[in-house]
Image: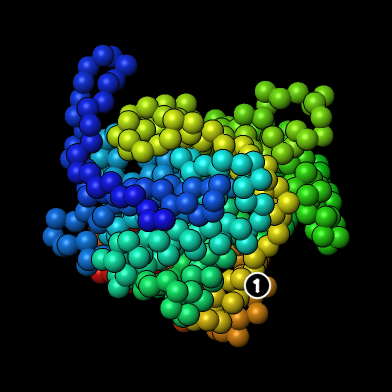
């Protein structure tokens, strides 16, 4: 069944709480639609064409952006809070990625954002289902939008989206090789990604301790909690490991006076779990995890925007679908998959000569850079020693800047970016550097 496409150039009038009407700036060329990926599940996508006055969109790559969670909406959060043309106030974003690429946002897994299921049994429960659904969407997309078949295509991701991106990238590579999907697949970028959960968890204690957010007693408690998770992982008790993961986060919150898991220098905690009492059932850890890692991205302001003006603009969202309304079910159904690693998938990508980029924010706790470095050391890639032997190079956000904004190391088809002064959401925290990184990864002059 072909995807429906709805091009639009100008945003409709928006009513503000003050009662005044404003007309936001002219938007770039767009298209959006649904793809039925299974008989009882439909996935929503939203495409923005590159918007550069000097060049046509065909001069720029196409980026697929995958949000985390699982259950967080790329069409909402990634678009309006990170890299899209407008922010959540519908004001132009100075560092939008549309300056250097066309961007395809997809709400995945099914049930995320505007995507939906008609049967509770249709939610994805593992990476395999997530990947197969995305292959259906990408096959339909490139068949419908033939102008993108020869343009370099990259997958960029964030958080749990990186775990999904690695698996999707491998399947896409195979599909392109087999000729079942026509596109110019050029690489995958894994941002603050949940590639190896246990390596992130083990790094929590040392990272917090070295940044003076844990004392000796706190370090011991967090380390003990991490060892319990590791033990469950070694026994392949993945759901138990997820429950223990939630409890470890409770221990961190208690010892750090509520550190923000997404940026340790941001004092106001964005978690909602503190309102929950400890007397509730043992299923609570899953609810807490959802609130910590998905629900906060569905902030009231963004939710009002997506379920109000944006819904009216798109015109195709079914009446029974509320943006983000199924996200808790998306998260809960993936609970058994949370703690599984995909290091071997990254190895396969490197062996297949797919370009792999890893980038991470210096201030990220949930996926600390120490943890990313740890799983990279576990790669079986034959060229890893040569990659490790490279000296990293400092990067500056712009030619005029004298302040180091990042470090970069590269060898053959593996790149690593250490993004300074950024938390989990790198483009939101360091927009200029994120845009420069995009240009480096996609081989544009910068």
What percent of the width, then of the height, locates residue 308? Answer: 37, 27
Query: On the rendered image, what quadrant is the N terminus found in?
Result: bottom left
Point out the residue furthest to the top here: 19
Residue 439 appears in view = no
| For residue 364, side relative to residue 249 (left or right) | left
Point out the residue furthest to the left here: 54
Disc 1 packing (10 Å; few <14; some 14–19; many ≥20): some
Looking at the image, which residue is at 32% across and 70% down?
149
Looking at the image, which residue is at 81% across and 29% down?
281
What percent of the width, then of the height, locates residue 325? Answer: 54, 33
Vertical arrangement, residue 169 with respect to residue 425, above or below: below
Looking at the image, which residue is at 22% across and 44% down?
8
Looking at the image, which residue is at 71% across and 59% down?
340
Q: Secondary structure at mark 1?
A: helix
Q: Nearer the viewer, residue 428 or 57?
A: 57
Query: On the rendered image, what quadrant is the C terminus found in?
Result: bottom left
| For residue 390, side relative to residue 439 (left or right) | right
Q: Which residue is mark 1?
A: 344
How many numbered discs sit on the rendered protein? 1
Vertical arrangement, residue 265 with respect to residue 381, above or below: above
Residue 55 appears in view = yes
Quadrant position of residue 141: bottom left
What percent of the width, then of the height, locates residue 187? Answer: 44, 71
What percent of the width, then of the height, locates residue 323? Answer: 47, 34
Quadrant position of residue 280: top right
Vertical arrangement, residue 182 with respect to residue 288, above or below: below
| For residue 89, side relative to residue 206 (left or right) | left
Q: Nearer the viewer, residue 286 or 411?
A: 286
């Amino acid at each position: 069944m072909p995807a429906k496409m709805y091009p639009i150039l100008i945003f409709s009038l928006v009513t503000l709480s003050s009662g005044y009407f404003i007309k936001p700036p002219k938007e770039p060329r767009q298209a959006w639609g649904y793809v039925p990926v299974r008989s009882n599940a439909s996935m929503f996508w939203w495409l923005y064409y590159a918007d550069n006055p000097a060049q046509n969109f065909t001069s720029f790559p196409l980026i697929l952006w995958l949000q985390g969670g699982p259950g967080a909406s790329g069409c909402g959060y990634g678009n309006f809070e990170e890299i899209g043309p407008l922010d959540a106030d519908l004001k132009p974003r100075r560092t939008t990625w549309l300056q250097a690429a066309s961007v395809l946002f997809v709400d995945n897994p099914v049930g995320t954002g505007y995507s939906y299921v008609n049967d509770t049994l249709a939610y994805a429960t593992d990476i395999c289902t997530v990947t197969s659904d995305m292959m259906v969407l990408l096959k339909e997309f490139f068949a419908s939008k033939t102008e993108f078949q020869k343009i370099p295509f990259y997958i960029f991701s964030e958080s749990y989206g990186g775990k999904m991106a690695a698996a999707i990238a491998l399947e896409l590579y195979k599909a392109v090789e087999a000729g079942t999907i026509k596109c110019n697949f050029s690489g995958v970028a894994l941002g603050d990604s949940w590639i190896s959960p246990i390596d992130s968890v083990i790094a929590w204690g040392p990272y917090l301790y070295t940044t003076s957010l844990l004392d000796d007693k706190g370090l011991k408690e967090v380390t003990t909690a991490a060892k319990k998770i590791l033990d469950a992982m070694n026994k392949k008790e993945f759901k138990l490991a997820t429950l223990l993961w939630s409890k470890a986060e409770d221990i961190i919150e208690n010892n750090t006076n509520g550190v923000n898991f997404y940026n340790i220098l941001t004092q106001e905690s964005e978690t909602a779990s503190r309102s929950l009492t400890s007397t509730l059932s043992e299923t609570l850890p899953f609810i807490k995890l959802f609130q910590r890692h998905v629900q906060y991205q569905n902030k009231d302001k963004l939710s009002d925007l997506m379920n109000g003006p944006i819904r009216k603009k798109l015109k195709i969202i079914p009446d029974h679908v509320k943006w983000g309304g199924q996200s808790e079910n998306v998260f809960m159904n993936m609970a058994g998959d949370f703690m599984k690693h995909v290091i071997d998938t990254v190895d396969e990508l490197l062996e297949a000569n797919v370009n792999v980029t890893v980038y991470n924010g210096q201030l990220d706790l949930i996926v600390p850079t120490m943890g990313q470095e740890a799983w990279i050391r576990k790669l079986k890639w034959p060229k890893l020693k040569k990659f490790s032997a490279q000296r990293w190079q400092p990067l500056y956000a712009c030619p005029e800047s004298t302040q180091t904004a990042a470090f970069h190391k590269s060898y053959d088809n593996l790149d690593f970016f250490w993004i300074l002064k950024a938390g989990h959401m790198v483009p939101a925290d360091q927009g200029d550097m994120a845009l420069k990184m995009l240009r480096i990864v996609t081989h544009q002059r910068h």
